Amino acid sequence: MKKIIIPAVIVVLALGAFLLTAKNETKTFEPLASDVSKKTVITPAVTGEKTIPTAPTDTEEVATDPDLENFYDEEILPATDVYPSAREAYDKIMASIKSYDDIVLEQFAGLNASNCTWCPELFASLKETMLGAKDEDTKGYLAELLAITGDQGNIETILEAYKNGSESDQEIYLESLEMTAGDDSLVTFLDGKIEGAAEPLKESLIAAISNHGSLAAVESLYAQTKAKGDPNGYYDYGMGLGEVIPDAAALPTLIDIANQKDDYSHLAVKALLNYGDDGLREVFNIIGSSNDTGLNNRLLADAIDHVSFDEETGALLDEIIANNPNPDVQKFANEIKEEMAYEESDSEADLAEEEE
């Protein structure tokens, strides 16, 4: 199945009121006796999956609500634009646990003391609540939110909770770690925790680093892949070098790794394709530099799953087919065009069926 980069969405603000009576005795904030805020957030229908949502299916109630017709076409507001204080943010978060509101989770992506004045107070309360919680939903939701912030102090708390937790709690904290994303200092921090870690923790740390596209992340994942000694690295687990969506600064290193044409080069090819058409062009250059069909086939293993199918890609393929006579380049370009045509035909058939 073709890898899909999840598009950004925005939460719609609507007038309303809500009242939350918090039941966890370890929390820092006391519940409000009246309206917490006149500003509340409309959330999508719950699908049961604990991931940042894509557009809902036509069977979900939210998709048929005319007031939410353009809900998924907009951008998610950061929490600092939604909640005026730690108190109101805390109450909204606690109210969102039961429905596992992904939109609220996404509002806190990348927030820390440098860009959110009330976040340290909020994080302290969330950590206290998470560590004192008895139910898995509360632990899981708060751990994921803390991980999404990318704040190193929050990640340290999750790691410590994992170390001291029961087997079921450890699974919760490992899953939350996989949602971590931040800057290069966080990549360095995560990388430093890998050596000597048990395999389940190591895989969660690798998954967290895979959420980053920086040069530091690419170098870390390449080193970990070689240390593992498995040509597929962590790709079979849906993580690692082959799943990175790289930054532009990481492209030269990925090109170098791909041009080595060794057991690990196919992972760099996949990462280049994740970058888009510029990465695809580089892959054609790499394939076109060799007449060894067997080697090129190894480099292109599962590569088509990482190609973006859009109008610009079609134009690039026509250019490549017209100007690069290498048979392996021609074959790969035509395979992509065939897959694009199939997907377009499949989409048109689905649309026609819906209209009926």
Image: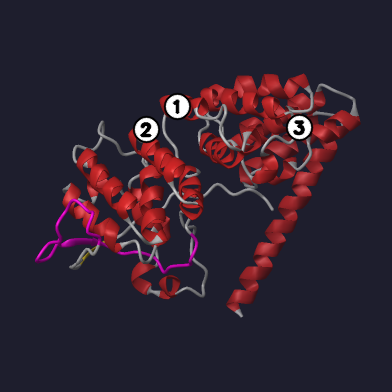
The residue segment tinted magenta is 24-49
User: Camera-side residue: 132 or 229?
Assistant: 132
Please give the label number shown on residue 232. Answer: none
On the image, numbered disc 2 is attached to which residue? 152
Going by the image, does 126 lie left or right of 347?
A: left
Relative to 285, say whether 349 is above or below. below
Identify the residue at image location x=49%, y=55%.
Answer: 168
User: Residue at image x 70%, y 44%?
Assistant: 236
Compared across the picture, whether 315 is left or right of 120 comes to: right
Q: Residue 241: which quarter of the image?
A: top right
Identify the residue at image location x=9%, y=66%.
Answer: 34
Q: Nearer the viewer, residue 299 or 160?
A: 160
- The residue singled out by tag 1 in the image is 189
Lower sequence index among marks 3 and 2: 2
Q: Secondary structure at mark 2?
A: helix
Do the residues under discs 3 and 2 have CB atoms within 8 angstroms? Answer: no
Quick check: 97 above or below 316? below
Q: Nearer the viewer, residue 265 or 277?
A: 265
In percent of width and height, residue 57 lies at 52, 69
Label 2 packing within 10 angstroms: few (<14), some (14-19), many (20+) = many
Left or right: 328 as drawn, with respect to 25: right
- Are dots 1 and 2 in contact, CB under 8 Å? yes
Q: Earlier in the sequence, mark 1 or mark 2?
A: 2
Where is residue 72 shown, x and y percent of the image? 42, 59
Report x, y in % for residue 283.
Answer: 72, 30
Q: Which residue is mark 3?
A: 231
Q: Residue 192 location in percent, x, y?
A: 50, 25
